[in-house]
Image: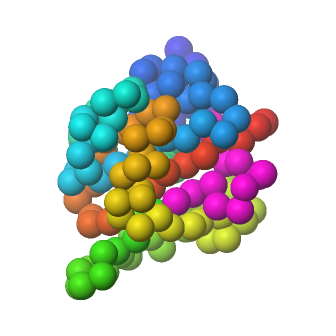
Amino acid sequence: MLKNIPKILSPEMLKVLCEMGHSDRIVIADANFPAESIGRDAIVIRADGHSATDILDAILTVFPLDTYVDSPVRLMQVMAGDDVETPIWDEYKAIVAKHDSRGADAFGEYERFKFYEEAKKCYAIIATGESALYANLILQKGVI
């Protein structure tokens, strides 16, 4: 047993987060994200029963965001023509602000297909059960 580790972080997640080095990236994916096909060359961790917000908050208790880049957190932009609200983005920004002094300034966006291409280069993908649309994000690891 370990102390002060959020229970939502499975042993597999902790192992992956520990293995990652500075500048490595991880995707927190919503339930619609093609995690298995995009993550063909990555580690895919299933977290189907959990929300992306709970996973993000837990990860950021043990995972430093990169301070050497302007946007260590990247969101998937809403496609032109999609009439979709993204209130979860405000939740993400509040969670990041709890753990990183940059708060909303730590965020950037990738166009949807650029997001997919960048996700293919990530070390791991956590496939959550998040039902919000456009709830995918990429985190870039920093140093302690």
Residue 70 shown in magenta: yes
The quadrant in which residue 104 appears is bottom right
Regarding residue 9, the answer to whether it shows in the image is: no
Near-viewer residue (9 or 123): 123
Residue 53 position in % (x across, y down)? 42, 55
Most extreme residue toward the top is 1
What is the basis of the colouring in this image?
Answer: rainbow
- Residue 25 vertical placement versus 86 (above, below): above
Which residue is rendered at x = 59% and y = 22% of the image? Answer: 19
Main secondary structure found in the magenta portion: loop
- Badge count: 0
Residue 22 x/y as whole percent: 70, 35
**Quarter holding residue 20:** top right
Q: Identify which residue, 116 or 15, lies in the foreground.
A: 116
- Seen in the picture, residue 40 relative to 52 is either above or below; the reply is above
Quadrant (top left/top right/bottom left/bottom right) for the C terminus: top right
Q: Residue at x 30, y 75 (%)?
A: 79
The image shows residue 61 at horizontal and vertical percentages of: 61, 42
Magenta-drawn stretch contains 48: no
Asked if residue 124 can be seen in this view, the reply is yes
Q: On the picture, is 133 further left or further right than 73?
A: left
Which segment did they paint magenta?
62-74
Relative depth, front residue between 93 and 36: 36
Please, is residue 75 above or below residue 128 in the view?
Answer: below
Please tell me whether residue 126 is drawn above or below residue 112 in the rendered image: above
Left-right relation of 78 to 90: left
Report the residue at 47% width, 39% height from top. Answer: 121
Across and down, in percent, residue 89 comes to 44, 70
